[in-house]
Image (spheres, grey):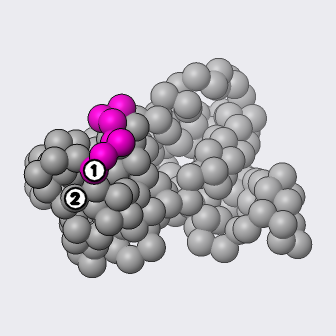
Amino acid sequence: MARTQGSHAGITGPRVREAALRLFARHGYAAVPMRQIAAEVGVQAGALYNYTPDKQSLLFELMKEHLETLLAARRAEPVPADALAALEQFTRFHIRFHARRPDAVFVAYMELRNLEADNFAVIERLRRAYEDDLEAILDTGVQQGVFAVAEPKIAAMALIAMLTGVNTWFREGGRLSLAQVEDIYWDMVRRAVAA
């Protein structure tokens, strides 16, 4: 099928991904047919296949892009040698990074069940790399005597789940600013691991 008049690959491709991300976050991957994505973008359904082989590939690419962007942003920040300072930096980074991307966060965490096995393995490796970063900070803190954490891997997953939860309730313009939320969460994280 032909593209809608006026559509261009360099413009339409990103619009397809943006529409899919928004629709998957709002309705869930399983409930969104390719026709709905096409309608949102303003192209015929068959034209979507110029930009993605299928809906599964679209979901996988959205999740992969989110996690690769997360890891690149995290690696760009110098990590303090002091474990307490490193944990505070991780806490604040995680909240700030995710608050700017609520749809991507929702899809990356809630749609894992819809990934095919090979795609799941890739996404799981990327998630593990991020979790390993926090686990290493916790291990260092235990060695430095500032953290009392029996199972750093489990603690890392629990802390990430708690920090990611900010996205489910925080809204700009609410009673608390994002900086205030960071302060409150940092206090909770610090107390949770303190020696």
Q: Residue at x 40, y 37 (%)?
A: 11
Q: State the extent of the magenta-drawn residues as a range.
A: 4-10
Residue 81 appears in the rendering: yes
The answer to whether 169 is drawn above or below residue 53 in the figure is below
Q: Residue at x 59, y 72 (%)?
A: 168
Image location of residue 40, percent across then percent down? 38, 64
Give the quadrant of residue 34. Answer: bottom left
The CA span between labels 1 and 2 is 7 Å
Label 2: element kind: loop
Image location of residue 153, percent across then percent down? 43, 51
Instruction: Name the residue carrying label 2.
Output: 44
Q: Amino acid at mark 1?
A: Thr
Q: Work out whether residue 63 or residue 93 is closer to the camera in this orientation and state it.
A: 63
Q: Residue at x 22, y 59 (%)?
A: 44
The answer to whether mark 1 and mark 2 are in CB contact below 8 A is yes
Image location of residue 74, percent across then percent down? 55, 32
Q: Work out whether residue 176 or residue 8 is closer to the camera in this orientation and state it.
A: 8
Image location of residue 120, percent across then percent down? 20, 53
Q: Is residue 12 magenta?
A: no
Give the main secondary structure, helix, strand or loop, of the magenta stretch. Answer: loop
Instruction: Name the residue carrying label 1.
Output: 4
Q: Is residue 7 magenta?
A: yes
- Sequence-earlier tag: 1 or 2: 1
